Image (cartoon, rainbow, N blue to C red):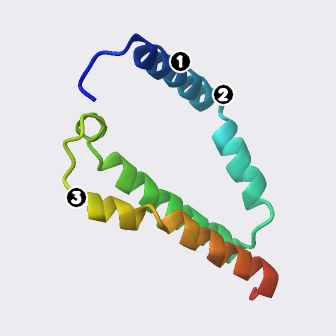
Amino acid sequence: AGRHSAERDFLNAYWSDVFDALKRSGIGSDVMTLVGSFLGEEQRTEVDRLKKRATQLLNGVDWKAFGAGKNKHDEKFFRKINEVPSILLIIIVIMVVVRPF
C-alpha cells in the first residue's frame, strides 16, 4: 500500500482534472435546480438544509489524512457508515411508491 505507483499517480491526476472541470462547468447547480423545480417549497427548504449540513460535514474532513489512512475512526465505523446510502435508497423507493406527500 505504501509503494509508489505511476499508474495510481496518473489516475489521481486524471480524475482530479475531471472533477475540477465538472465543478467549473456548473453542472452540479444545474442538476440541483432541475431537481428543485419538481419539489414543493417545503421539500426545497429541506433539501437546502441537508445540502448545507452535508457541506459542513464534508468540509470538516481532513482529506489528506484520510487518503493517507490516518483516520479518526476505526474500520467498524466505516463499515456502518457505508450502509447509509443503501438505507437512503430504500427510504426513497418506499416514499416514491407510497407517495406520502
Chain-order first, disc 3 or disc 1: 1
Q: Amino acid at mark 3?
A: Asp
Q: Tell me which corner region of the image, top left, top right, bottom left or bottom right, holds residue 29.
A: top right
Chain-order first, disc 1 or disc 2: 1
Query: Residue 101 or 92: which is nearer the viewer?
Result: 92
* 82 relative to 4, above or below: below
Which residue position is annotated with label 2? 25
Q: Residue 81, how many percent across, how many down? A: 40, 64
Q: Residue 28, how many percent across, how many down? A: 64, 41
Which residue position is annotated with label 3? 74
Q: Amino acid at mark 1?
A: Tyr
Q: Residue 12, how many percent across, how many down? A: 45, 22
Tell me how far mark 3 sits from mark 1, CA to CA.
Answer: 30 Å
Chain-order first, disc 2 or disc 3: 2
Which residue position is annotated with label 1? 14
Dot 2: within a 10 Å radius of its alpha carbon, few (fewer than 14), some, or many (20 or more) residues? few
Q: Tell me which corner region of the image, top left, top right, bottom left or bottom right, holds residue 80.
A: bottom left
Q: Amino acid at mark 2?
A: Ser
